[in-house]
Amino acid sequence: MKEIVVLSGKGGTGKTSIVASFAALAESKVLADCDVDAADLHLLLKPAILEEKEFWSGQVAVIDQEKCTECGLCEELCHFGAIKDFQVDPISCEGCGFCYRVCPVDAITMKDSMSGHWFISQTKYGYLCHAKLAIAQENSGKLVTVVRQNARSIAERETLDYIITDGPPGIGCPVISSLSGASLALLVTEPSLSGIHDLERVIGVCRHFGIPALVCINKYDINQENTGKIESYCLSLGIEVVSKIPFDNVVTEALIKRLPVVEYGDGTTSREIKRLWEFITRALS
Amino acid sequence: MIISVASGKGGTGKTLVASSLALSLTDNHKLQLLDCDVEEPNANILLHLPMDQSQRVYVPVPRVDTKKCTYCGKCAEVCAYNAIAVIKEKVLVFPELCHGCGACSYLCPESAITEEGREVGIVERGHSGNLEVIQGRLNVGEAMAPPVIREVKKYINPTNVAIIDVPPGTSCPVVEAINGSDFCLLVTEPTPFGLNDFSLAVEVARKLGLPSGAVINRVGIGSDEVEQYCRGEGIPILLRIPLDRDIAVLYSKGIPLVEGMPRWREDFVRLFEDIKEVIAARRAA
């Protein structure tokens, strides 16, 4: 079983459109949407939920105003500035429990936080593991880990060949959680200066964690000069640019119709994505 | 005045809007642009200011004095993040799990733990005329963006107009970036992904009690679902930017919209006036 994680650094480069097409192309797979704070893959795959569970993670401090003597020790010691006027700001509280342990009159308790939901769903393309982090919550990395564990156990149970993961943007906590231990990262970039800058950083993360990476340049014809820069940069690092997808309105048209691009039309873009998927399967075999 | 530019979905044009808004106001205002997308900071790719000042960002992590330590295990017991473990006569510290709450060092009965700084990123600053750029940059391989975002925001001067470029998503880095703003400008695009993630961003702004308004980018590619949603939710649409290949090409080259197409300047000035009106109306209400 091989796990392919699609990342980009910069958001909006086309990760989800490509993953949805892979969903239609790959035969034996489970899909995972690890962009748990702004998940979109379900909009194209139209899942029927089979299992839904609450995700409890982390804690928040609560001060009992009746017991509080307003000594101010908790406010003085909190490293996150989360306590003001003997009240805890649940948004700033990181749940460390320091205040709870030092309060001389035991006026502080730690409450568990419900941080979101995770789902296992059936789609016409196979199983989809996904989640929804509650608004403004922490622990997105831990929720990503749950989604990946769900996908892995389905893949093992059903002896599937691939886990195909739609990753989050950026390079921080949820990206690291999505990537660690994967077989391959497909990095989708675009030929803008921002796209190049962000690609360099996400390549850095892949190297840091020892994950092999391939690069796909989406909308490559928006700026051919920058596309050339990406190709020579990748060449210098020994990373292969395996696909160049043109700027094509068909991608948005398919999205509006809520269909994977490869099911919407059979033009250049669809053919290129098919070629990309074939390349990946060969690279992993 | 502090204006956050956020989106939920990545790649909708936050940095394009933040940079053009800043550049359009420098004739009459002192401006600060704070790039809080510390995983992938891109604002200065468009603004090109020389970054001549920099400061490293450290988070406190425990350092154990083995001469004083009695291996009692108190530190491991109080750590909410499993960042410190005591195994027989050995204390193991996992710095990348540590949130720097300070509980272990304060509660150690032997005073054997001190806090030492671990570098997780850098804050760089530069200015030109009335514009100052402050950008945070998380080190590659680090998971936690909030400490870097907090350092960037320490430079806010409330007598200026401060524009915050917010990371994508809805979780802790987004909240850290937006919290304390006077207004949240939400940039989206008229696609199903744009709408889904926009509605999540609206919830974040509401949870933080902030007035918000929308910028719809790439008008013409999709449907009018986003417009309908805004009308239904009472969110003013303050600016529409059409789908235009020339705008995408400018962005790819790192040229701000208002420099490549100066006629847009008055639209951004009007956007600022509208934002001030929404804030004033909220304060009056």
Image: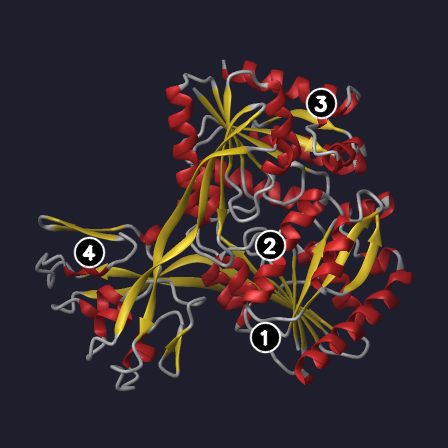
Badge 1: chain ID: B
Task: Name the element at disc 4.
Answer: helix
Query: Which residue is tagged 2?
Result: B200
- Amino acid under disc 1: Ile
Q: Real-space Cα distance between discs 3 and 2?
A: 28 Å
Q: Real-space Cα distance between discs 1 and 3?
A: 49 Å
Instruction: Confirm whether residue B132 shows in the render.
Output: yes
Q: Is residue A50 left or right of residue A224?
A: left
Residues packed near mark 3 inside 10 Å, few (<14), some (14 to 19) or many (20 plus): few
Task: Name the element at disc 2.
Answer: helix
Task: Name the element at disc 3.
Answer: helix
Q: Is residue B4 positioned above or below A256 on the image?
A: below
User: Do marks 4 and 2 share a subunit?
Assistant: yes
Query: Which residue is tagged 3?
Result: A263
Q: Position of residue B128 (x, y in %)?
A: 72, 70
- Amino acid under disc 2: Leu
Badge 3: chain ID: A
Of marks 1 and 3, the one in the foreground: 3
Query: Which residue is tagged 1?
Result: B156
- Amino acid under disc 4: Ala
Q: Which mark is residue B76?
A: 4
